[in-house]
Image (cartoon, grey):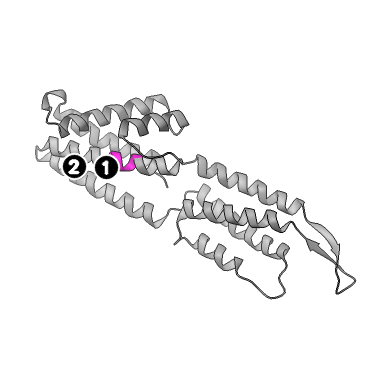
Amino acid sequence: MANQLSQRFQELHSQLGAVFQAVKWVQSQFSNTPDERLDSEMLLSWRVKARNLLVKAGGTDSEHYKQFLETEKPASYRSEVDLARELRGVFAAAMEDYEGGYMRSARSLVQAEVFDTELDQARALCSSGYHTAAAVIARTVLETAMREICTAHGIGPGKLDLMNADLAKSGAYNKLVQKQVTWLSGVGNAAAHGKVADYSEDDVVAMVGQTETFLLTHLPQ
């Protein structure tokens, strides 16, 4: 995930800098002191894009998004330049927390817990000798995770093989990871179709472990 969202944070950080660079001093109609003025359209455009990014990065329940909305509310005697400065502070905090890995959406946390539970179930099935069932569960976890990863990278979800190819093509991960996912999917498919001769018990154990590692590395944070 140190990918498109991280890049977008950097882009919007630069765009906000451009907003401040466009600030001009204009003679006030009400006093002899000039006022700071910025391009309202530029600021509005940035605000919309920043809100969208905060939702993608942390969800609507994140403190960063809530504070951003709160800061946007009208306030007496506050200029647009003052508003931009306050929003800059909120955005900077969100960017720092995201880059530091401290910003996970509630949805991501719940999904991660579900995956952990299902993989624990798959491991328990392996221990009890039910390797086919374990492989089917692990494949379901993998496919669901791939959909999450595709969404995070702006890729439309589809069949597992297509998602795998699209993610590798987009640079989300390299060709070696693509081959690993193909193998994981292959074991799961064979189990789902009852082709027990196409995989071993050791393959299933390895599949469950590698699926967990893949999720830890590539699942959106």
Q: Does the segment drawn in magenta span residue 213?
A: no
Query: How far apart are the alpha carbons under marks 1 and 2?
Result: 10 Å
Q: Kindly identify which numbered label has been placed on residue 211.
A: none
| Position in image of residue 173 (x %, y %) | 43, 31
Nearer to us: label 1 or label 2: 1
Q: Does the segment drawn in magenta span residue 142?
A: yes
Q: Amino acid at mark 2?
A: Ala
In terms of secondary structure, what is the magenta stretch mainly? helix
Q: Which residue is mark 1?
A: 141
| In the image, residue 73 above or below residue 21 | below
Residue 102 in sight here: no
In this rendered view, identify the residue nearer to me: 218 or 153. 153
Q: Is residue 135 left or right of residue 52?
A: left
Q: Is residue 137 left or right of residue 153?
A: left
Q: Residues within 10 Å of mark 2 (few under 14, many from 20)?
A: many
| Position in image of residue 88 (x %, y %) | 64, 57
Q: Amino acid at mark 1?
A: Val
Residue 87 in sight here: yes
Range drawn in magenta: 141-146
Q: Is residue 64 left or right of residue 146?
A: right
Q: Is residue 191 left or right of residue 53?
A: left
Circle 1 sits in a helix, a strand or a loop, which is it?
Answer: helix
Q: Quadrant of residue 185?
A: top left
Q: Which residue is mark 2?
A: 122
Task: Kindly check if marks 1 and 2 are in contact, taking CB atoms under 8 A apart as contact.
Answer: yes
| Position in image of residue 175 (x %, y %) | 40, 24
Residue drawn at point x = 51 percent, y = 60 percent: 65
| Position in image of residue 35 (x %, y %) | 82, 65
For this orientation, the residue located farthest to the left is 129
